[in-house]
């Protein structure tokens, strides 16, 4: 199946080449009597391959429209022929379905002259993005150069290019965009393969400036790869579909199949795990979407999520820090790879804390906070069983079917309202009632 998909992709790319390569390597003599883009293509023999592809894809009428306005990046016949030769196929091998996305990958739905082009991403008519770099001439998606600009027509403009513009993958954008060069350098072979594969993904791509603030040199290859996978979410998640809450990345906990969580906050822009914000959203590729972010999203601890999710856990964070300065819970709960980690944390929400009088004496609140933490275990919701479990300050009672957890000093059980917020050093389950030790009865 993968080989079939690959062949189809090649055919599509091939068709783009065919469509685009209709201009000549030499400066073509353009028909001054041309009106629409489609008429221009039909009147110039150096665009014969493009014309044939447009006819097969039934797009001639589209580019003949006088009600619309287009920008077409048009490869010449020589570029098209070279592309077909490399792939070992002909135009006859391609269907309308193959050709349409390739051809439309060369079309922007408005007229953009060379003086209006600027470095950055634009959407094209195939539904994916195009990366334009104007730092030295005009280069498309990292390897296609405009050779003749501003061929003006009545319904838009043509820019002749020297290659077919392949429908880009996520990896193509990482490679093409100089601001993402650090990501391209550190990407492992497996990560690169994922970003260029058929599986639909969402990539949160840190800029070079973001990588400048993080030292990865002390990490093993596996840790680097897991950190990079912490920037990848399964499926295509456009900014319009993102909502405040938890998702999962492709990074995993402790070599298991348990994917790490990621906290998304859309209250003011889009922020991940409280530290990394989207700078450029919705760069669409053939295999997903990329959001460019301003900070590397390091592997999260349970503390990371508590701090990031202030709407639910700000009172808990205050109790773990401001109210307990001599205990340093933040340091303890950030421990990875050694005791007392991993942790299973039953985390009371702000609403839960609001229902009790929170002690302001450290000696009184430390036992309560310890009563919410199970040390040495990463107990996910599917592993909960009825009975007691030992916390850092005595036993609590689990009802796995509810699910709920009850402290010895509570009259009723606390509902587990959010499960399996997976960190690199443990898991959080949010609860709606503060657990009270028996001594608090």
Image (cartoon, rainbow, N blue to C red):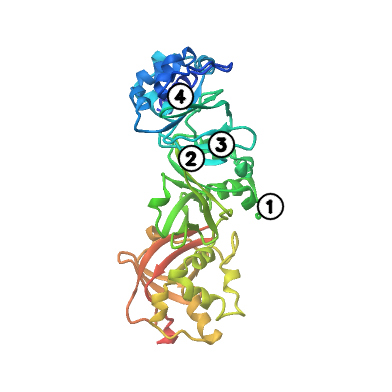
Quarter of the picture containing the N terminus is top left
Identity of the residue drawn at 40% across and 84% down: 356
Tag 2 near tag 3, CB within 8 Å:
no
Residue with the mark numbered 2: 122
Rendering quarter of residue 430: bottom left
Label 3 secondary element:
helix
Residue lying farthest to the left in this orientation: 402
Q: Nearer the viewer, mark 2 or mark 3?
A: 3
Q: Nearer the viewer, residue 431 or 133?
A: 133
3D distance between C-alphas at marks 4 and 2: 18 Å
* Tag of residue 309: none
Q: Residues within 10 Å of mark 2 (few under 14, many from 20)?
A: some
Identity of the residue drawn at 60% across and 75% down: 328
Q: Nearer the viewer, mark 2 or mark 1?
A: 2
3D distance between C-alphas at marks 2 and 3: 15 Å
Dot 2 or dot 3: first in sequence order is 3
3D distance between C-alphas at marks 3 and 4: 25 Å
Q: Residue 97: x percent and y percent?
A: 35, 25
Rendering quarter of residue 276: bottom right
Residue with the mark numbered 1: 218
Residue with the mark numbered 3: 115
3D distance between C-alphas at marks 4 and 1: 44 Å
Reply above or below: 217 against 362.
Answer: above
Dot 4 or dot 2: first in sequence order is 4
Tag 1 near tag 3, CB within 8 Å:
no
Dot 1 or dot 3: first in sequence order is 3
Query: From this viewpoint, is residue 434 visible?
Result: no
Dot 2 or dot 1: first in sequence order is 2
Label 1 secondary element:
loop
Residue lying farthest to the right in this orientation: 217
Rendering quarter of residue 348: bottom left
Residue with the mark numbered 4: 16
């Amino acid at each position: 199946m993968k080989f079939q998909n690959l062949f189809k992709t090649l055919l599509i790319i091939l068709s783009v080449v065919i469509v685009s390569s209709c201009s000549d390597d030499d400066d073509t003599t353009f028909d001054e009597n041309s009106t629409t883009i489609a008429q221009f293509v039909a009147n110039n023999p150096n665009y014969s391959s493009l014309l044939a592809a447009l006819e097969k894809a039934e797009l001639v009428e589209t580019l003949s429209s006088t009600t619309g306005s287009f920008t077409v990046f048009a490869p010449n016949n020589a570029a098209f022929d070279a592309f077909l030769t490399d792939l070992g196929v002909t135009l006859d091998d391609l269907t309308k379905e193959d050709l349409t996305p390739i051809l439309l990958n060369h079309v922007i739905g408005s007229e953009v002259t060379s003086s209006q082009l600027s470095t950055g991403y634009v959407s094209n008519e195939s539904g994916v993005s195009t990366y334009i770099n104007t730092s030295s001439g005009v280069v498309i998606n990292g390897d296609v150069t405009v050779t003749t600009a501003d061929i003006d027509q009545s319904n838009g403009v043509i820019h002749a290019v020297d290659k077919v513009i392949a429908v880009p993958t996520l990896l193509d954008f990482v490679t093409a965009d100089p601001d993402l060069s650090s990501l391209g350098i550190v990407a492992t072979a497996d990560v690169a393969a994922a970003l260029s594969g058929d599986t639909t993904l969402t990539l949160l791509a840190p800029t070079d400036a973001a990588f400048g603030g993080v030292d990865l040199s002390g990490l093993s290859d596996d840790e680097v790869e897991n950190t990079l996978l912490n920037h990848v979410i399964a499926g295509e998640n456009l900014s319009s579909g993102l909502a405040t809450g938890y998702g999962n990345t492709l990074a995993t906990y402790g070599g298991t199949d348990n994917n790490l969580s990621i906290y998304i906050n859309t209250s003011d822009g889009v922020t991940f795990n409280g530290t990394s914000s989207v700078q450029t959203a919705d760069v669409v590729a053939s295999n997903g979407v990329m959001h460019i972010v301003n900070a590397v999203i390091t592997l999260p601890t349970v503390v990371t999520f508590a701090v990031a999710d202030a709407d639910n856990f700000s009172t808990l964070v205050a109790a773990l820090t401001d109210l307990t300065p001599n205990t340093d819970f933040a340091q303890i709960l950030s421990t990875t790879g050694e005791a007392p980690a991993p942790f299973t944390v039953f985390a009371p929400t702000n609403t839960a804390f609001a229902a009790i009088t929170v002690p302001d004496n450290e000696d009184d609140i430390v036992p309560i906070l310890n009563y919410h933490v199970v040390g040495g275990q990463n107990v996910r919701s599917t592993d909960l069983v009825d009975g007691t479990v030992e916390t850092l300050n005595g036993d609590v009672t689990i009802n796995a079917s509810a699910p709920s957890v009850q402290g010895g000093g509570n009259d009723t059980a606390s509902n587990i309202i959010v499960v399996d917020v997976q960190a690199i050093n443990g898991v959080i389950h949010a609860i709606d009632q503060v657990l009270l030790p028996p001594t608090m009865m």
